[in-house]
Image (cartoon, coloured by chain):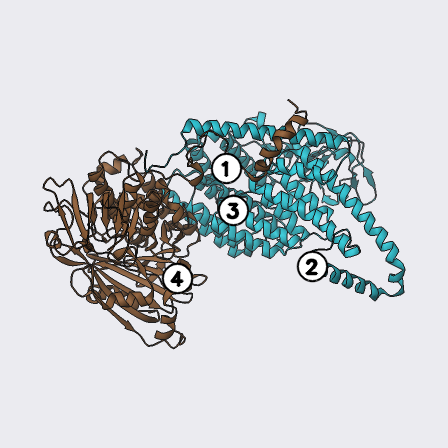
Amino acid sequence: MSDDLPEEFDLIVLGTGFAESCIAAAASRIGKTVLHIDSHDYYGDVWNSFSLEAFNKLLDQPSSSLRNGSYTWHEPAEEAPSWTRETLLEKSRRFSLDLSPRVAYSAGALVQLLIKSNICRYAEFRALDHVCMLYNNELVSVPCSRSDVFNTKTLTMVEKRLLMKFLTACNDYGEDKCNEDALAFRGRTFLEYLKAQRVTDKIATCVMQAIAMCDASSSFETGMQRTQRFLASLGRYGNTPFLFPMYGCGELPQCFCRLCAVFGGIYCLKRSVDDISWTPDAKELLLSSAGKTLRAKHIVCAPGQLPATLAPHYGQLQPHISRGLFIAASPLGNEELNKGGGGVNLLRLLADEGQREACLIQLSHYSGACPAGLYILHLTTPAFSEDPAADLADFTAQLFETNAPQILYSAYFTITAPTNANESAATPIYCTAAPAYELDYDAAIADARHIFSQIYENDDFLPRAPDPEEIVVDGEDPSALNEHSLPEDLRAQLHDLQQAAQQMDIAE
Amino acid sequence: MHGRVKVRTTEEERERKKKEQVLKMRAYRAAMTRIQKKRSAGELDDELLGLTVQILQRNPDISTLWNIRRECVLRKTGELQSALKELEATEAPEATVAAGKLEEVEKEDKVEKEEKDDTGEADSKAVTGVAALAQQLQAIYTTELDLTEHCLMVNPKSYNSWHHRCWTLEQNPQADWQRELQLCNKYLKYDERNFHTWDYRRYVSAKAAVPAEQELDFCTEKIKVNFSNYSSWHHRSLLLPTLYPNEQHDRPMSEHKLQEELEMVLTAAFTDPNDSSAWFYQRWLLGSGAQERDQPVAVAAFRCWPHKAQLALKKPYPELPQLQIQLISEQQTWQLQPWQPTNGEKTQWQCDQAIYIDPSQDYVLALAGQRLKLSVQPSDKSLYYFVPPHATASCSKELLGELQTQLQSCLDLLEYEPDSKWTLLTSALLMRAIDVTGYHEQSLAHLAKLEQVDALRRGYYKDLALRWTMEMALAKWPQTSNYPQLFEMPTKISSTRTPYVQYLIVADTVSS
């Protein structure tokens, strides 16, 4: 292959998923030469969002990281006869169907990282409208903010007070006052603590299901920490503590790739790797791809992109996440939850008496991920079999039993992960983890950060990228007044002033 | 270093900022000097307007510059208006011929204007006619409005910008008040607590004749977003009494609406008991409303002997000597004057006038449109009038029910949070709203508790307890056998700072 690609890099990254893109951007940002390759013709790997057509194609062709794909077209509902298979496919490109949908805590790891690194300028978010819970088989909104508590009709006046009091106590927890609690409840469960606060059953459900996102066995410390995380993210961007990336989660890896490219990273999509070998001291790795050998000091690789020769080192690919994806002509829940054309909502579901859980994200057209009038329902749960539909059956039953939305299309698939994923001592290649079952990107960011710190021990992980006007062009006096940074009227004055000032008496 | 982006050091950045600062300062001084010169020379022209814009955009709080702008605007609009008059005068004969023709002229003007827009070549001076001038006039006002809007972006709490906006709109007989209302909506979306905007909103909505219901809905929306908002509660308190007037004038609004409001405000208070705004609004709801504002001169007590008269007022009214005060019997009318205040607060007045009193006759005291029926003191045959402070307000069954529910909620809350100060105070107020006499001891107990948990306001609670005790004693007084000769001062009240002391002019003796 005759390309003018350099042959030597500090770092070669295989796979453009979230964690890989983070590492690529971080290395490029500190001046390392980076080559970023993906065997697919799109960015994002299993973190990408797809058009409806591309998504179907993906399900038809199992790959190492995605299998057990299936999809079904349902009879158009009587109430929405205009949505047929044909009309949906016509709008194929208006869909952004996520393989790994997430929401981000407004003050969580992802948002902090985006702000800290200044990558936020490439990203756009929609604040979630409602965090929901199932209470007595009814979908209700969990009052998150102070104004929610004030406005909600589901709580009595005294319940409102109790909920607010409990949340305030959790928020202040750790600032001395509650230290007695910390001692008293050490080693006990969060549920016990909740019960000791004399809250009603409804409030306990709110807190356990949606706010602390705990189960009965969660420790006091875990529950408290999660509640605090929820509370710390409130009141930042919207009425709930969560954000969803506009146009789907597939946008996020690309934001990091963009930063990597701005700092000189080189991108090659649709380029597969045949083999990777290394010198005995593992100081240099040789990567053969399309008949060319590239040399790198380090290689980072996504589990699904390992060359066939090396994959066995990381063990078998096992089902990791079971996913369901539904396109519906009506939203879940009542009008209150879907004001003005549908909400972007989050719901945590429990099954097997709280032993298993799943996460549901409902997207309306406000998320930019589907056409108006349609809704995407993303259902995610940790896999325990090769049959994603069976894994999710308990949850779909809860959701669609009563007031089922008019489902037009449903799809199921499994995302895989190697059995002994990271830390294989057999190769000097750093292997990132497959998408974990989590709401936010905490685990993925921690993974990226960990690998980065192993490679570049003493370097800062994604320090703030300067804005264009902060950058000094070669040969420029760095302390000179930059005409372009001035307000418009002053810019004009800068020219006039020199002459004008000489002619005028300036009052001192 | 290869591959790294060079960014300014903080030192370099500071130096750059300093240079920018110097440039800004020089620009400011140059513009200010030029402005003053032009103004002294009477050159109130477009250039002067342009110069002020540069400075006001960055600092909208220089009143001098706004004043100068107003001078310029007045000059410009004045010229245009006189030109307009001249033009109308010349066109007037036509107008008298046929009134309909004027419309045609206007239409022609419009066509002319459209043509001008289409070609974009015609010089504005070439376009004459009424419409063109009127358009120029509007353009001046629009410029001013745009500038203030820009300045409000810089500082949404700029008194000068808001004032200039009002002034501009007042100048323009064709001001677009709906647009101003939209502006208020926009600004209150950015900051729902900006009292400047709320104030301006009241001004605009009065001008635009916005229905009070609509304003109330808007207000409710804002409270739903964030109830910690004094401005919004205040806005409500102005709207509700006019929208839902109270027939008896002893409550701020109709009982039905009052019930709803009480429920809403208590929900807010329960959501966050530390937020004082809701509690303040609740106190207003539980109060007696506009009753006392309606009567500037409220008589507490009156007594009249053959040689003098004494008058006690609920609230100070220094202008009393200017009032016409008459004592009217069946046969005769006395003008009582002159009046001299006998205490510092001017709530007690005396008039040394000789009056013949016939105990067998009925006497009436007339002042400020009120006619008060007088009684005869059996001991010395003097005439007197007495009404205890804060007679209990009327209360329908429904309202009473609501108040009791609320009281119960407060008492429930106190079980969880026995030291919550607002809850203690509010439950005391609710008790008094429900049954002053029955809850007298319990409400005083709450005040005693408040003195402990909110020690910083101990004096306030003590004073309140004193007032309530005295109110109770005065209310019970007419039913006692000694009334009206002897008033027994309740225990614990020192005579030096007795509230409602003016009411006691009716009594001959005050025992302690």
Find the distance from the CA under tag 3 to the CA under tag 1: 27 Å
Which is in the foreground here, disc 2 or disc 3? 2
Where is mark 3, residue-wise? B190
Hey, what amino acid is under mark 2?
Thr
* Quadrant, the N terminus of chain A: bottom left
Q: Chain of mark 1?
A: A
Mark 2 is surrounded, within 10 Å at the Cα level, by few (under 14), some (14 to 19) or many (20 or more) other residues, namely: few
Find the distance from the CA under tag 2 to the CA under tag 4: 47 Å
Tags 1 and 2 touching, CB below 8 Å: no
What element does badge 1 sit on? helix
- The answer to whether one can see residue A200 in this image is no
Colour displayed for chain B in the image of the structure = cyan
Where is mark 4, residue-wise? A364
Mark 3 is surrounded, within 10 Å at the Cα level, by few (under 14), some (14 to 19) or many (20 or more) other residues, namely: few
Where is mark 1, residue-wise? A485
Q: Is B151 on the left or on the right of A323, as rendered? A: right
Colour displayed for chain A in the image of the structure = brown
Q: Chain of mark 2?
A: B
